[in-house]
């Protein structure tokens, strides 16, 4: 029997969340962002789950786009970082990949190409990672005309830095800069919104939005969990309870003896740890779920196991399934306890953890 430490993926939750993104983006359309192995959910399976819904996918790099082709899906795929090498230009053209170009050297590659892919221009409106400054855009457009590749230009992309924070004015500022920067080309497509921008009241959505994290049911917003935003968690991270023991007052558990029982404590050991991608920074008090009850981590997370306090789950016994995050415990809550964001937890589940799709399994609780 294999160790029953698994990530169960509910593909109907992916579709539910994608439809919510579409409603919030409407009349703009939504390209489904499935980079980083579908945020840890498995890029081929996520693409298959959304292929009937999403007209386009978006990924970071060409390897990910090719993985979508290997899954047998012919949809347009947007490469959010464009090409990383001139050799990729022809592959992108052949495969129907749309590249988002952010730098002059990428424009130069188009000049020498015999086959030119569809492409977008990235506009830097304040994130200051990638993109052409608004003042340089006319220049870049002039070069594209000179290279005679204008007809392959789909439109303009920008990316928000602070859309997760409803109290910030920065998204409005960036939206204003973007609108003005691209005003001379009204017929070209525009794309700005990440997941968070879908939840900002009054936010213009332009022609294409780019939801990522919300598709997986985790929250893009600082103060809310995914379920609080109407999202359904797509991943349930589960592991078996493999030992139960009583700790006497004064006894501790785990490396560094960082947690000590103040009273007699029924304690359980769960077969999952940071070697599986469960965050080591999740301290005592981080929630989990077993046998219908919410429980708490105690002590340090090890590579292959962690300890929980079973005082509030008296029925729990070895063999039971513990949900580390999923429907009962939001990944957003675990992320908060670990001092990180759900993005990092979902993309960090390691290859040791098999993904199962749409299998009810031995659901925790
Ligand atoms: C990853 C990414 C997105 C999706 O962001 P979420 O916060 O996951 O919705 C959108 N646009 C770009 C350029 C990205 O890199």
Image: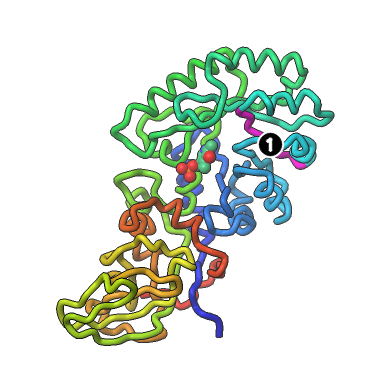
Q: Is residue 356 visible?
A: no
Q: What residue is pinned by disc 1?
A: 83
What segment carries the magenta color?
95-102
The C terminus, quarter of image: bottom left
Q: Nearer the viewer, residue 350 or 316?
A: 350
Counting from the top left corner in percent of width and height, residue 117 is at 74, 32
The N terminus, quarter of image: bottom right
Secondary-structure class at tag 1: loop
Q: Residue at x 45, y 19 (%)?
A: 177
Farthest residue toward the right? Answer: 114
Q: Residue at x 44, y 57 (%)?
A: 345
Up-down relation of residue 136 to residue 116 (above or below): above
Counting from the top left corner in percent of width and height, residue 73 is at 70, 51
Q: Is residue 239 magenta?
A: no
Horizontal side, residue 298 vs residue 234: left or right? left
Q: Residues within 10 Å of mark 1 (few under 14, many from 20)?
A: many
């Amino acid at each position: 029997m294999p160790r029953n430490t698994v990530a169960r993926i509910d593909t109907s939750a992916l579709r539910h969340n994608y439809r919510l993104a579409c409603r919030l983006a409407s009349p703009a359309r939504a390209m489904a962002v499935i980079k980083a192995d579908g945020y840890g959910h498995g890029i081929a399976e996520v693409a298959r789950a959304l292929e009937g819904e999403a007209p386009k996918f978006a990924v970071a790099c060409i390897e990910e786009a090719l993985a979508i082709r290997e899954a047998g899906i012919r949809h347009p795929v947007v490469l959010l970082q464009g090409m990383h090498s001139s050799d990729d230009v022809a592959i992108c053209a052949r495969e129907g990949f749309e590249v988002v170009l952010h730098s002059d050297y990428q424009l130069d590659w188009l000049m020498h190409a015999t086959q030119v892919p569809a492409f977008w221009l990235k506009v830097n409106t304040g994130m200051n990672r990638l993109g052409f400054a608004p003042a340089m855009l006319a220049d870049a457009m002039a070069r594209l005309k000179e290279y005679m590749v204008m007809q392959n230009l789909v439109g303009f992309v920008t990316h928000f830095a602070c859309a997760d924070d409803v109290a910030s004015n920065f998204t409005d500022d960036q939206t204003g800069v973007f609108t003005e920067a691209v005003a001379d080309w009204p017929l070209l497509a525009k794309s700005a919104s990440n997941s968070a921008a879908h939840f900002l009241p009054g936010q213009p959505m332009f022609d294409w939005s780019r939801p990522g994290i919300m598709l997986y049911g985790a929250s893009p917003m600082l103060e809310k969990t995914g379920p609080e935003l109407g999202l359904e968690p797509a991943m349930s991270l589960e592991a078996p309870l493999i030992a139960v023991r009583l700790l006497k007052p004064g006894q501790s558990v785990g490396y560094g003896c960082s947690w000590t029982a103040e009273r007699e404590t029924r304690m359980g050991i769960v077969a999952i740890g940071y070697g599986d991608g469960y965050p080591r920074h999740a301290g005592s008090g981080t929630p989990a779920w077993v046998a219908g009850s919410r429980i708490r981590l105690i002590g340090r997370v090890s590579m292959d196991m962690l300890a929980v306090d079973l005082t509030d789950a008296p029925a729990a016994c070895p063999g039971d399934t513990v949900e580390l995050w999923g429907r009962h415990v939001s990944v957003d809550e675990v992320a908060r306890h670990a001092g990180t964001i759900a993005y990092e937890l979902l993309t960090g589940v390691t290859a040791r953890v098999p993904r199962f799709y749409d299998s009810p399994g031995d659901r925790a609780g």
